[in-house]
Image: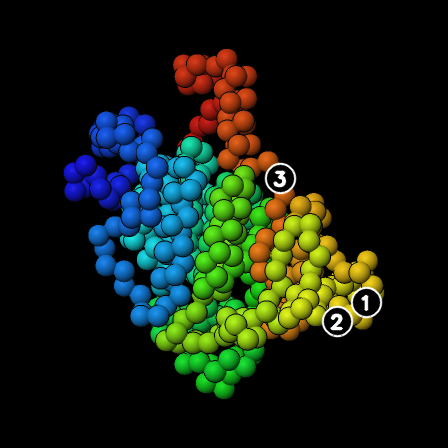
Amino acid sequence: MTAIESHPHVHDLGMPGNPISAAIAASVEASGEKNATLKAKDLKTDQEVRWCPGCGDYVILNAVQSFLPSLGIAREDMVIVSGIGCSSRFPYYMNTYGMHSIHGRAPAIATGLAASRPDLSVWVVTGDGDALSIGGNHLIHTLRRNVNLTILLFNNRIYGLTKGQYSPTSEVGKVTKSTPMGSIDAPFNPVSLALGADATFVGRAMDSDRKGLTEVLRQAAEHQGTSLVEIYQNCNIFNDGAFELLKDPATGPMWTIPLVHGEPLVFGPGGASCVVRDEFGGLRIAETNQVEASQIVVHDAHREDPSYAFALSRLSSQDLRYSPMGVFRSVAKPTYDRMMTDQLEDAAAQSTSTLDDLLAGNDSWTVSA
C-alpha cells in the first residue's frame, strides 16, 4: 500500500464510484488484506500518541486496538467519529476511517453516516463534557432513535483539555478553577441519562479493567442499535484518583457490583453484600446474611422495561462508592437506519411518477412580489 493508502482516515468514506475509494478497495483486495485477520498493530497509525503520561486514555486505546480485530471487520469498513476533548484525539491514532468533528456533534454526524452507509461499523468517541454539556441533545436523540452505532463515553468527571474546570459529571462540592468554592450543580449520571432516553444497550466499564472493558465492548459491538458504554477514565493531571476506591485492590471489591446476566447481584469480600428490592420497587444494598436468598435480585439485562436497569443505575447516585459494572440493558428493537431504508424502498416501489411528471404536475406555486 502507498503512504496515503496506509491512512484511510484521511480519505472520504468510500462513497461508491469515488476513484480514490475504488483504488483503495482494489489495493486491499489485491493484497488480500480484506480477508486477512487484522492484528492490533494494523490499527495503529504513525501518529505520536499525545496524552498526558499516565492518562487512562492510553489503556482504552490499547484495549480498543486489541479488541477490534476480533470483530472480523476490515479497516476500511470501520469509522470513528469524535467531538472535541482529550478523548476526541482517538481518530488520529486509529488506522481506520475517521473524523475529528465538532464540539458535541459527533453523535449527529455519526447518525448521518450510519443511516446512509449501513454497511459500515460506526463508532463515536466522546467525553463527559463533550457529550453531556454542549452535546447533550445530540446524544439523547441518537439514543432514542436507536441508530446502529457504538458510543464510547469517557467519564473522568472533569474538563481535561481546557485545564481542569468542573464538568457535568463532577460531584457536588467539587473545587476546580471554575468552582473555587465548590460546585453546586447536581451531576449527571450518564447511565441513568441513557436509560431515560430508552437506549437499547447501556454498559459501564473501568479503563484499567482490561478484561471487563473488553467484554462490555464486545457485547456493545455485537448489538444492533445504539450502544452506549460509559468508561470510568482517570485524569491524573486534573482529577487524579477520582475512581481510586474502585481501582484499589483492597477497596474495589467492596464497592464494585459486577453485572452478569442471569446471576445474583452479590458482591464484596466473600459475597458479603447484595442488591435487593426496597418497599417501593427500587433497589438498595443489603448484607447478604441478613436477607433470604430469594430476595437477592438476579440480573436481567434483557428486560424490556428499562425501569429495572434505571433503578440499578441509581445505586451509584445514592452512594458514589457503589458502582455496578457491566451491561445494564441489552434489548432488541428496530434500528433507525433500517426503518429509514425500508421507508425509502417502499416509497420507490409505490411511485410511478417520472421527473417529467413531477415538473409538469399540479404541485406548483407562483411567487410574486
Q: Is 42 left or right of 323, judged from the image as shown?
A: left
Q: Which residue is at a point 61% across and 60% down the rendered structure image? A: 258
- Which residue is labeled 1 in the image? 291
Q: CA distance from mark 3 to mark 1?
A: 34 Å
Residue extending farthest left: 2
Labels 1 & 2 near each other (Cβ < 8 A): yes
Q: How crowded is the residue under tag 2: few (<14 C-alpha within 10 Å), some, or many (20+)?
A: some
Residue 271, image x, y percentages: 68, 66
Q: CA distance from mark 3 to mark 2?
A: 34 Å
Residue type pointed to by label 2: Glu
Residue 166 vertical position relative to residue 326 in the rendered view, above or below = below
Quadrant where the N terminus is found in the figure: top left
Q: How crowded is the residue under tag 3: few (<14 C-alpha within 10 Å), some, or many (20+)?
A: few
Q: Residue 28 is drawn in which quadrant?
A: top left
Q: Nearer the viewer, residue 307 or 297?
A: 297
Q: CA distance from mark 1 to mark 2?
A: 7 Å
N-terminal-most mark, 3 or 2: 2
Q: How crowded is the residue under tag 1: few (<14 C-alpha within 10 Å), some, or many (20+)?
A: few
Residue 319, image x, y percentages: 64, 73
Say which element carries label 3: loop
- Which residue is labeled 2 in the image? 287
Residue 194, image x, y percentages: 58, 55
Residue extending farthest front: 270
N-terminal-most mark, 3 or 1: 1
Say which element carries label 1: loop
- Which residue is labeled 3 in the image? 332
